């Protein structure tokens, strides 16, 4: 699923999902991305969710990871296979083997807009 880059958390980000979040409390290695419409509205990650991604966090089994391919960011789930990782799309489909330079970071937190925040 495709992601929209919002920017580094250290500078603060104006997004309804991040209202009231102290961006200064995050590592300078963290950035935010917004989940695109192809995610749909069913599942653990849905359209409009904001994901906090840590570039310095080491990749582990069953982590959500942000991958850069063809100048775009995508979300995958990582599964350890020996010394390598198999990346699988959350909404199904064929996976791929990870290379270190493809993985931009590990999702450390998910933020979702509440309807009250959107209506305000």
Image (tube, rainbow, N blue to C red):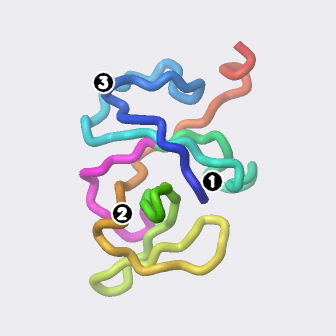
Of circles 3 and 1, which is in front?
3
13, 18: nearer the viewer = 13
91, 99: nearer the viewer = 99
CB contact under 8 Å: marks 2 and 3: no
* Magenta-colored span: 52-64
Marked residue nearer the N-terminal end (2 or 3) = 3
Residue 79 within the magenta-colored segment of the rendering: no
Secondary structure under tag 2 reads strand
Q: Residue 52: give x, y in percent of width and height.
A: 43, 42
Q: Which residue is painted at 70% across and 55% down in the image?
A: 38
Taking the image as shown, residue 118 lies to the left or right of residue 67, namely: right
Crowding around mark 1 (Cα neighbors within 10 Å: few <14, some 14 to 19, many 20+) is few
- Disc assigned to residue 103: 2
- For the image shown, how many numbered marks are present on the structure? 3
Marked residue nearer the N-terminal end (1 or 2) = 1
Residue 53 within the magenta-colored segment of the rendering: yes
Q: Residue 108: give x, y in percent of width and height.
A: 40, 47
Secondary structure under tag 3 reads helix
């Amino acid at each position: 699923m495709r992601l929209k880059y919002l920017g580094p958390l250290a500078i603060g980000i104006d997004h309804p999902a991040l209202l009231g979040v102290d961006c200064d409390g995050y590592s300078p290695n963290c950035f935010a991305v917004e989940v695109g419409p192809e995610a749909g509205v069913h599942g653990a990650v849905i359209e409009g969710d904001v994901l906090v991604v840590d570039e310095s966090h080491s990749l582990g089994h069953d982590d959500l990871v942000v991958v850069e391919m063809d100048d775009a960011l995508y979300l995958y789930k990582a599964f350890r296979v020996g010394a390598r990782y198999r990346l699988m799309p959350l909404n199904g489909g064929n996976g791929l083997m990870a290379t270190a330079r493809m993985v931009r970071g590990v999702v450390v937190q998910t933020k979702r807009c509440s309807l009250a925040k959107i209506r305000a």
